[in-house]
Amino acid sequence: MTNRISRLKTALFANTREISLERAMLYTASHRQTEGEPVILRRAKATAYILEHVEISIRDEELIAG
């Protein structure tokens, strides 16, 4: 394992997991827009909506963003 990968792994496991408030808000917004549609379509559209609107984060030492 390279030094960079080792540092990324250490940083990943050093922090506690967090719930994304942004994702929850985007999911809710999509869910409101698709009221009355079948559940499977609502979930698919919510996922698409989140992916289209979520803020992109690029962390230190990442070579592939996202």
Image: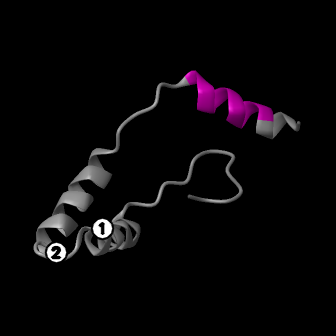
Give the percent coordinates (x, y) of residue 60. Answer: 62, 45
> Is 27 left or right of 53, judged from the image as shown?
left
Give the residue at mark 1.
46
Residue 27's quadrant in the figure? bottom left
Give the percent coordinates (x, y) of residue 47. Answer: 37, 66
Q: Is residue 57 above or below residue 16?
A: below
Residue at 69% over, 36% down: 8
- Main secondary structure of the magenta stretch: helix
Residue 19's quadrant in the figure? top left
Bounds of the magenta segment: 6-14
Residue at 11% over, 72% down: 35
Q: Earlier in the sequence, mark 2 or mark 1?
A: 2
Q: CA distance from mark 2 to mark 1?
A: 9 Å
> Is 50 left or right of 62, judged from the image as shown?
left
Q: Residues within 10 Å of mark 2 (few under 14, many from 20)?
A: some
Q: Is residue 5 magenta?
A: no
Viewer-nearest residue: 40 or 15: 40
Give the percent coordinates (x, y) of residue 10. Answer: 68, 27
Which amino acid does the dot numbered 1 rest on? Answer: Ala
Give the residue at mark 2.
34
Q: Is residue 28 above or below residue 60?
A: below
Give the percent coordinates (x, y) of residue 66. Answer: 56, 58
